[in-house]
Amino acid sequence: MLFTFLLVVHIIVATALVAIILVQRSEGGGLTSGGSPGGLMSARGAADFLTRTTAILAGVFVLLSIALAALASVERAPSTIDTSLVGKTAAPASAPAPAPVSDDPLAAAAAQGGGIASNGAAPQ
C-alpha cells in the first residue's frame, strides 16, 4: 500500500520535473548565474524560481527513488529460509580408480608411486 502511494507520488514528481525543465529557456547560464534584485515578476526572478523548483523536484525524485528501492528490497525478501538441503551430505568418496593398463613401463612405474630417487638413481 505504501509502495503504491510512493510510486504514484514518484510519477507525479517525475512528470512535474519534466514539465519544469521544458518550460525553462535553453539560454541563461543555469548554475553560473548570480542573484538578481529584480524580484519574482522579472524574467530573472522567474528563471531563479524555475531553477530552484527544478533543484527541489530533482532532490525529491532522488529521495523517492532510494525509498522505493529500499521498500522493494524489503517486500521481496524471503520470509522463510529453505532448509530442504540441510543434513544431506555428498556421497562418500570411493577408492581411487586403478591406473589404466599400459605398455609404457614409465607410466606403470609412475602409477605405482615409483619415480626417480633423490640421488638421481631409479628405484629398485
Image (tube, rainbow, N blue to C red):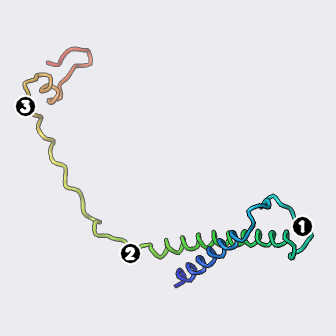
| Foreground: disc 3 or disc 1 | 1
Q: Residue at x 14, y 44 (%)?
A: 95
Q: Secondary structure at mark 1?
A: loop
Report the residue marked by disc 1: 36
Give the Cα separation between the discs numbered 3 and 1: 95 Å
Q: Residue at x 14, y 29 (%)?
A: 112
Q: What percent of the width, then of the height, locates residue 72?
A: 50, 73
Dividing the picture into quarters, in which one does residue 7 lie? bottom right
Q: Residues within 10 Å of mark 1 (few under 14, many from 20)?
A: few
Q: Position of residue 57 (x, y in %)?
A: 69, 72
Of mark 1 and mark 2, the one earlier in the sequence is: 1
- Label 3: state its secondary structure: loop
> Which is more toward the observer, 101 or 13?
13
Q: Which mark is residue 80?
A: 2
Q: Quick one: label 3 or label 2, which is nearer the N terminus?
A: 2
Question: Hey, what amino acid is under mark 1?
Answer: Ser
Mark 1–mark 2 Cα distance, whole angstroms, equals 60 Å
- Image quadrant where residue 77 sits: bottom left
Q: Amino acid at mark 3?
A: Val
The residue identified by callout 3 is 101
How much space separates mark 3 and mark 2, taking CA atoms? 54 Å
Residue 120 placement: quadrant: top left
Q: Which corner quadrant holds the C terminus?
A: top left
Left or right? Give the position of 110 relative to 84. left
Q: Position of residue 78 (x, y in %)?
A: 41, 73
Q: Nearer the viewer, residue 117 or 48?
A: 48
Residue positioned 75% across, 66% down in the render: 25
Q: Earlier in the sequence, mark 3 or mark 1?
A: 1
